[in-house]
Amino acid sequence: MAKITYIESNGAEHVVEAQAGVSVMEAAVRNMVPGIDADCGGACACATCHVYVDPDWLDKTGKRESMEESMLDFAYEPKDNSRLSCQITVTDALDGLVVRLPEQQG
Amino acid sequence: MTETLAIIGAGQAGLSAAASARQEGFEGRIRLIGAEATPPYQRPPLSKAYLKGEFEIDRLHLKPAEFYESADIEMDLGRRIVAIDRDGKTLTDEAGAEIAYDRLIIATGAPPRRLSLPGADAEGVFYLRTLKDSDALRAILDVDGTIVVVGAGYIGLEVAAVARAAGRDVTVLEIADQPLKRVAGPAVSAFFANLHRDEGVDLRLGTGLEEIETTHARVSGVRLTDGSRLPCAAVLVGVGAAPDQGIAADAGLDCDNGVLVDETALTSDPAIWAAGDVANFPSPFYGRRLRLESVPNAIEQGKAAGTNAARAAAGRDPIVYDALPWFWSDQYDVKLQTAGARPPNETPGMAEVIRPGAAGRSFSVWTTLNGALQSVDAINDPAAFLVGKRLIAARGNIDLDALADPSQDLKSLL
């Protein structure tokens, strides 16, 4: 299990206990965190689960693959710490992870 | 008196309609009625990751159980509706029990077309739409013997890819002269034909199924339209889907390749909407009627139907459904993403250009009609998909020559 904090663009925080093995997107959907649409259900096809990873966690969340990189390039306000949350798998090492949500998806 | 909004069909469109009606302020009862016993789940992984065994059923559920409680959506699962009485505003289920409604949304989807030829009912003949179908198919991926896939559409090709990855011999039969003929252009069709052959699939084009041969009522082989025979262990049928419109047509709602709705998802009855695979709708963008079998359409049109049912209850004006269609498919390590709706092949005024992608085995096909961009098929090229989506939505004309030049930055087209 890992505790993940999702912070909406308006500052609202959602703290979630996420099971290892699911994605950061799925943990949000299962816990009804608003602001992550995930229309494609995690297939890296729609770019509607965009998050900004807190800089302290960038090493642990891993690197973007090329497909994800291109999708993010065209997401709403991409930044260096942008990720598609469907492409980050929850592990115990991510306990305490903080991600912020963009103002909008797509 | 409290109003009841009933929704027939607890798939992606039905769920989206229920959630949107509540979000729009509908205060009455919302009853989500599903023929399957499972709460709303994702279907796309049934022919991809779930079929591969990469994840389990709990990851298919679209919403957690608490969602239905907090949104006060009543789940009525394992209940098949067999009749709509529009005068009495009642639904009847298989057991003869009745459900009263004030407003109704039909989201029954599009089940697979069934084969009707000798042996079609044999054990070992599979279709793929539901979780149960996928579980049954998954079980045979471990069995020896060839799997024959009938139909080189998305379902057939995705299953072929999973079966090859599982080490099975796969023969794909397609009566047309190329795969994906109904949905894709020649370049995309040729790409997928080559891809599957490279991966070891025996793809037989221009070849159909004549008969399924059986031994003790179990599939033992197939006889093809060219007269040849092929022993096999299982047959997966993926020959398209047909809208589940029977109850709507019986109730006298206008139907023609789906339940006919207007641009607000309303049917010919002012108290009934339809959404998702079952709905045939006029696309304001394309100026023609479409019936789409895709998740994004189910989500967005479901949203329109639910929102408009809530608005009608409150005496407010409806919203128009005009979302741009899009679609994706995963086969082996290839991702296809399609933005927009491609005009049917050989439509007058249609032109297209192929743009090479940045990486190997990536390209995109851009299709225009009288100069206006209609659709983009992107193979391993998400940038082309996303740029295409925006350009189509912007409704501009596009310079195909500039597009075909790979040195031209895609972003400069925005």
Image (cartoon, coloured by chain):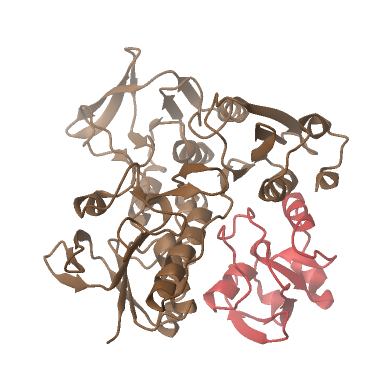
Task: Choose between B17 and A44: the one closer to the eye.
Answer: B17
A32 shown above or below B414: below
Please tell me whether residue A37 is drawn above or below residue B380 in the rendered image: below
Res. B4 image quadrant: bottom left
Residue B144: x percent and y percent? 39, 35
Q: In this structure image, what is the colour of chain B?
A: brown
The image quarter containing residue B73 is bottom left
Q: Nearer the viewer, residue A43 or B408?
A: B408
Outermost residue to the left: B96
Tally the numbered discs.
0
Which residue occupies 46% across, 20% down? Answer: B205
Decide if residue B396 is on the left or right side of residue B88. right
Q: Position of residue B257 (x, y in %)?
A: 35, 42
Asked whether residue B176 appears in the rendered view, the answer is yes
In x, y percent, where is residue B311? 44, 74
- Horizontal placement of B217 versus B77: left or right? left
Which is nearer the eye, B117 or B188?
A: B188
Residue depicted at 55% across the width and 60% down the height: A41
Q: Position of residue B347 (x, y in %)?
A: 55, 27
Quarter of the figure with the N terminus of chain B: bottom left
**Image position of B381 (left or right of B311):** right
Tell me, what hue is chain A? red
Q: Residue at x 55, y 55 (%)?
A: B322
The residue at the point 23 percent across, 61 percent down is B80
Q: Is residue B141 left or right of residue A45?
A: left
Q: Front-most of A51 and B99?
A: B99
